[in-house]
Image (tube, rainbow, N blue to C red):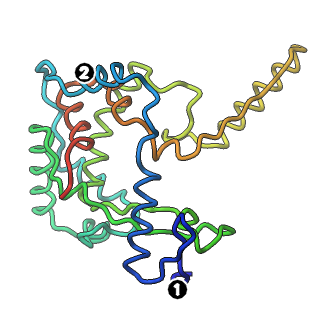
């Protein structure tokens, strides 16, 4: 597959490695860009202003500990490494002194609400989708490989955000995607149970299924950040850093 030419939108072919790379880059840029703005400009500006305005000072984020970092590293899977080629296996074999230094770095990040830009840099590999035309860029699924130390930081941040989100019941009970101990099988059980209950009560039961293409890839990031304004300021600033820091 990798030796096939790939088609541009105008039906011309990209045959050199540089042409293929540029074609895939253009395709990914389009697929990973937010949907065209369907909101009024004033509403969009108000949302963006709310995000960018200075937030009130509050208590700092709870620091991490050596034991927490060690536990996260212990439970890392064996996925491929990011651009620095430091694998999860290497992280597991680091001496205790190195993990302690990492803990200092993570605590500095939590204290300053600053994430090293290099930890946002990722490597994208393309996996062919079986049954799709192999000469079309859209027939390949992008997989993002992040640095191991960046993924550890994400888990530390998530452990501090998730209890707040649960306490405020931000995630609807009907949502099963991207939730721990929730799967499509659980959602199917819920659906079947709802249908069965409706039929037992002799009610009319109708179902509407909507599949939003690239919903996660093209989500409105500013809108999500706006919904997270209730988070403690340092946590919110960390998340905002992911959005507004440009990697050179």
Residue 239: x and y in percent read 26, 37
Residue 2 in view (yes/no) = yes
Does residue 78 appear in the picture of this structure? no
Residue 95 lies, with reference to residue 60, above or below; the image says below
* Residue at image location 46% in from the left, 40% down from the top: 35
State the image quarter where residue 244 is shown.
top left
Q: Secondary structure at mark 2?
A: helix
Give the residue at x 39% y 64%.
25
| Side of 166 where 154 appears, left or right | left
Q: CA distance from mark 2 to mark 1?
A: 49 Å
Horizontal relation, residue 149 to residue 168: left or right: left
Check contact, mark 2 vs mark 1: CB within 8 A: no
Left or right, 200 with respect to 132, comes to right
Quadrant in the picture for the C terminus: bottom left
Q: Residue furthest right?
A: 202
Left or right position of 49 against 116 = right
**Residue in the picture at 83% in, 21% down:** 205
Q: Earlier in the sequence, mark 2 or mark 1?
A: 1
Q: Which residue is mark 1?
A: 3
User: Camera-side residue: 94 or 188?
Assistant: 188
Position in image of residue 164 (x %, y %): 33, 25
- Quadrant in which the N terminus appears: bottom right
Figure check: 6 above or below 124: below
Residue identifier under label 2: 50
């Amino acid at each position: 597959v990798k030796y096939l030419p790939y088609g541009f939108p105008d039906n011309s072919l990209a045959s050199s490695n540089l042409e293929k790379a540029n074609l895939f880059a253009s395709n990914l840029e389009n697929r990973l860009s937010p949907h065209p703005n369907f909101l009024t400009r004033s509403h969009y500006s108000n949302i963006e202003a709310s995000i960018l305005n200075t937030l009130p000072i509050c208590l700092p984020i709870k620091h991490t500990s050596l034991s927490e970092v060690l536990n996260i590293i212990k439970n890392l899977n064996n996925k491929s490494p990011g651009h620095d080629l430091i694998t999860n296996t290497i992280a597991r074999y680091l001496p205790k002194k190195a993990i302690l230094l990492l803990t200092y770095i993570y605590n500095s990040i939590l204290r300053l609400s600053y994430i090293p830009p290099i930890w946002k840099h990722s490597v994208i590999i393309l996996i062919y989708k079986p049954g799709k035309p192999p000469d079309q860029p859209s027939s390949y699924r992008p997989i993002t490989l992040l640095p191991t130390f960046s993924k550890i930081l994400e888990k530390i941040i998530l452990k501090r955000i998730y209890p707040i989100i649960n306490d405020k019941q931000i995630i609807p009970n009907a949502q099963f995607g991207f939730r721990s101990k929730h799967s499509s099988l659980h959602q199917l059980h819920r659906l079947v149970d709802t249908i069965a209950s409706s039929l037992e009560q002799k009610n009319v039961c109708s179902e509407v299924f909507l599949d939003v293409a690239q919903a996660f890839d093209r989500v409105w990031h500013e809108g999500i950040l706006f919904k997270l304004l209730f988070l403690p300021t340092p946590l919110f600033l960390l998340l905002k850093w992911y959005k507004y820091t440009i990697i050179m």
